[in-house]
């Protein structure tokens, strides 16, 4: 199966409802892009966790996941588990973010995610980034909400292992969760790798994609 290449990506926006969402959902993709595109501009925003130990973890983690990138991380203070009640604040924060960046790619939660904070953010992203390629990442958790993805970004085994190790290292507050361990992260990456004929992969969802590369012909 032949694939498209993200050869023209020089700037991305990546969004999460909680500290660790971005790294879980797209940590391997960040490692690959930042290593392949020196000076990549990464504008990241997380809706919850400001002024807590979670923000400290997030800053440390995304610095590690974005080697060599120009990283702009914003962590907001919305209440965890209550984000849908703050629709206006989320919309306003996204609009401000949009004025500060012009990304080639936008990555955020998947629209079908059963966590209400994730789903709320996923609903609003395309209302602000209206002319962008948007990929929705998946987060394996106790909710039975894994779906069949439509987009795969392959990872080597070394990148998959690096992602799993960085997650465990930089988010010690999540170590008590039964699913938050390297084995879980590598297992899902291996399954997505099988589905994309690669060693490991991260998988995403998208509602719309435009394929370019051939000049339009006139008749």
Image: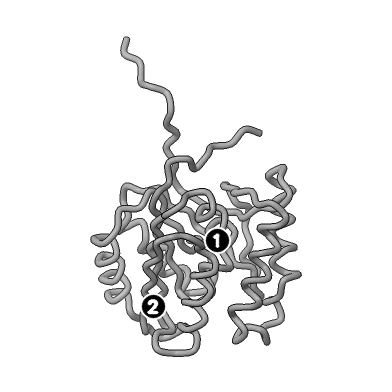
Does the CB distance between marks 2 and 1 fall below 8 Å? no
Mark number displayed over residue 75: 2
Which residue is most to the bottom?
A: 52
Q: Is residue 158 left or right of residue 121?
A: right
Q: Residue at x 29, y 71 (%)?
A: 93
- Residue 68: give x, y in percent of width and height: 47, 60
Location of residue 82 in the rendering, given as x and y in whole percent from the top left corner: 42, 83
Query: Viewed as shown, does residue 181 lie left or right of 90?
Result: right
Q: Indicate whether 218 appears above or below 128.
A: above
| Quarter of the picture holding the C terminus | top left
The residue lying toward the viewer, choosing from 38 and 86, is: 38
- Residue in view at x 45 percent, y 73 percent: 17
Residue 177 locus on image (x, y percent): 67, 83
129, above or below 83, in the image: above
Q: Residue at x 38, y 63 (%)?
A: 43
Q: State how far apart marks 2 and 1 are (Cα).
A: 17 Å
Rendering coords of residue 208 (x, y %): 43, 44
Within 10 Å of the Cα at label 2, are there few (<14), some (14-19), or many (20+) other Cα atoms? many
> According to the image, label 1 marks what residue?
26
Seen at 67% across and 77% down, the residue is 180
């Amino acid at each position: 199966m032949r694939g498209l290449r993200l050869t023209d990506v020089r700037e991305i926006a990546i969004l999460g409802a909680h500290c660790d969402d971005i790294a879980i959902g797209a940590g391997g993709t960040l490692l690959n892009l930042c290593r392949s595109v020196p000076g990549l501009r990464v504008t990241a925003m997380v809706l919850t966790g400001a002024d807590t130990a979670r923000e400290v973890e997030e800053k440390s983690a995304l610095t590690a996941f974005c080697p060599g990138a120009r990283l702009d991380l914003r962590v907001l203070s919305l209440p965890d588990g209550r984000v849908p009640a703050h629709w206006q604040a989320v919309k306003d924060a996204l609009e401000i973010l949009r004025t500060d960046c012009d990304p080639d790619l936008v990555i955020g939660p998947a629209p079908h995610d059963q966590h209400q904070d994730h789903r709320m953010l996923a609903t609003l992203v395309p209302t602000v980034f209206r002319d962008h390629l948007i990929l929705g990442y998946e987060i394996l958790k106790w909710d039975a909400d894994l779906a069949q993805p439509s987009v795969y970004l392959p990872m080597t085994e070394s990148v998959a292992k690096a992602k799993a190790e960085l997650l465990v290292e930089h988010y010690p507050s999540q170590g008590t969760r039964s699913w938050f361990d390297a084995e879980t992260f590598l297992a899902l990456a291996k399954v997505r790798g099988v589905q994309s004929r690669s060693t490991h992969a991260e998988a995403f969802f998208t509602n719309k994609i435009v394929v370019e590369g051939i000049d339009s012909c006139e008749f």
